[in-house]
Amino acid sequence: MIWHIARRELLVRLRSPFAWVVAGTWLAVQGLMFTLILGLYLQAGSGAADLEQEGLPLLSGLIEPLYSAQSLLLLLFMPLLSMSLLAAEQRGGTLSLLLSSPVSTLEVVLGKWLGLLGYVSCLLFVGGALAPITLVVFGDPPLAPMAGAALGLLLLAAALSALGLLASALSGSQLVAAVVTWTTSLGLWLLAVLEAGDGPFAALGRHGSLLVHTRSFGRGLVDGTDVTWLIAFAFVALLAAWQRLESWRWR
């Protein structure tokens, strides 16, 4: 039943004009960022060659900036993609029908989450595949760092999808759900400014920031602590959304 709900959620998005507008905007911005970053990388490389110095490393000059750009796109677009997950069901009155059917609330939560994650993964693959294909065709790039960056983006998408699902479960308004998702994810991202120094605030920045736990993937490093943190973040958000639906079922 989970896969049935996920498939239905994905098909609904593929038939929605709004989802195609968001996807087109996402891919257009992604392509523009790739063009700009690649142009800056080539300029830096040619400048270093003129000075008879070693060219800019591929990892720090291209892969890491592309990963950072993709992460920011996830941060900006995820509230728009997740706001209708459960808020629209509440608004339209179909949530009561869904909860009265022989489907558990856990299956609803996981199905909705997997459907959104599948849609976002398609966007990441279609837009993000341009960079590695270009690098493989015209050069000999390190595959391990690119695989690490892809894993980081997938984990970040999973965490933000779970957060968006929770916000959508807490409010019947899609706008409110989008604002809650955006402010929460941005606040967790900006906690990284606190990590410098000592004290409880620095510890909060190091252990509670989305940026701190995702940036290492762009450098080609897959840290078990970061992987565990992102999985735990998604798990807690999904658990809270599940409990919210349980309260609706017994209301």
Image (spheres, grey):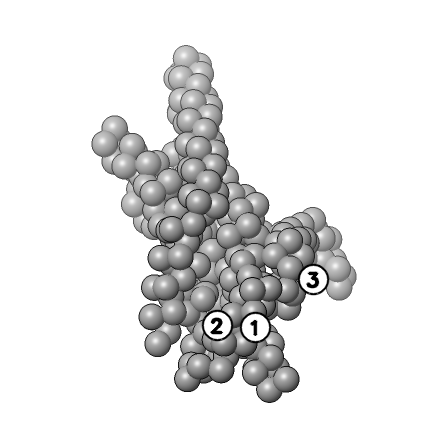
Amino acid type assigned to the residue bearing label 1 in the image: Ala
Identify residue type, mark 3: Leu
Q: Earlier in the sequence, mark 3 or mark 1?
A: 3
Label 2 vs label 3, nearer the camera: 2
Which quadrant, please, contains the N terminus? bottom left
Estimate the x, y position of residue 180 in percent, counting from the top left: 66, 57
Q: Residue at x 37, y 41 (%)?
A: 128
Q: Amino acid at mark 2?
A: Val
Picture disc at residue 204? 3
Residue at point 71%, 58% (across, down): 202
Between circles 3 and 1, the one closer to the viewer is 1
Q: Give residue 241's mark.
A: 1
What secondary structure is found at the residue carrying circle 1? helix
- Label drawn at residue 109: 2
Q: Secondary structure at mark 3?
A: helix
Outermost left residue: 137
The residue that appears at 47% across and 56% down in the rendered structure is 157
Query: Disc 2, disc 1: CB below 8 Å?
Result: yes
